[in-house]
Image: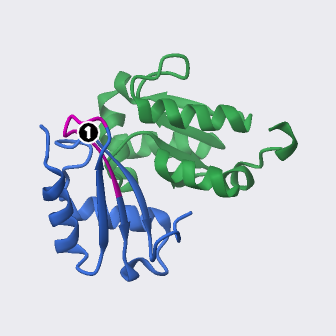
């Protein structure tokens, strides 16, 4: 495993819900990252973010780690869930709420 | 670098021959597209695997040459929802 991969692996395993994104929750640098943050905010779930723009090694490494070419990328309980389109589909179907254990009554 | 919608459609059809493909240029700038791809070949694959098939069809252009491709996939129309 490359150094970037082991760093990513550690982040993914240490945080129950973690979003690799461009920018920060307050200042997302891309519409797709912004949408991903909005979905998680709406769920009211605690999540960590990693700004890939601040770390070229992670920015490249995350694409290889998940065999997925784009950012954002959501990981829950150590598993890659998908990008913002999959997040939106799963949000609409209620699967994402279940996966992160969000309290449905908080919506 | 912008990419033509019919080129995206051609590449997807080439890799997934029986796919129904609809491309929409979201911003009108040739750089932000949405694609709906439905194929019986997707049956039994997870969403991640379905999207990976489309990304592979585009040969590494997504995330590079093509800034982003909003994707909706499924084995048949309406199946992805």
Would residue B26 be found to the left or right of residue A41 on screen?
left
On screen, A4 above or below B43? above
Taking the magenta stretch, the answer to whether it contains residue A1 is no
Q: Which residues are magenta?
A: B27-35
Q: Is residue A4 above or below residue A65?
A: above
Q: Is residue A21 left or right of residue A19?
A: left
Residue A93 vs residue B24: left or right?
right
Q: Name the foreground residue: B21 vs A53.
A: B21
Residue at (87% x, 42% y) in the render: A105
> Which residue is identified by label 1?
B67
User: Chain A is shown in which shade?
Assistant: green
Residue A101 left/right relative to A21: right
Asked whether the viewer can see residue B70, the reply is yes
Q: Chain of mark 1?
A: B
Quadrant location of residue B59? bottom left
Chain in blue in the render: B
């Amino acid at each position: 495993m490359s150094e970037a991969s082991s760093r990513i692996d550690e982040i993914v395993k240490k945080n129950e819900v973690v979003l690799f994104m461009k920018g920060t929750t307050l200042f997302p640098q891309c519409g797709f990252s912004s949408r991903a943050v909005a979905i998680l905010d709406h769920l009211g779930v605690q999540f960590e973010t990693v700004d890939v723009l601040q770390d070229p090694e992670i920015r490249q490494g995350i694409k290889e780690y998940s065999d997925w070419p784009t950012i954002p990328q959501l990981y829950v309980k150590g598993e890659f869930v998908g990008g913002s389109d999959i997040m939106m589909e799963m949000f609409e179907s209620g699967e994402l709420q279940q996966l992160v254990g969000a309290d449905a009554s908080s919506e | 670098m912008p990419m033509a919608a019919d080129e995206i459609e051609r590449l997807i059809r080439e890799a997934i021959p029986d796919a129904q493909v609809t491309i929409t240029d979201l911003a009108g700038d040739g750089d932000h597209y949405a694609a709906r791809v439905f194929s019986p070949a997707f049956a039994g694959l997870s969403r991640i695997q379905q999207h990976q098939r489309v990304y592979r069809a585009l040969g590494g252009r997504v995330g590079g040459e093509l800034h982003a491709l909003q994707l909706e996939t499924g084995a048949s129309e309406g199946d992805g929802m």
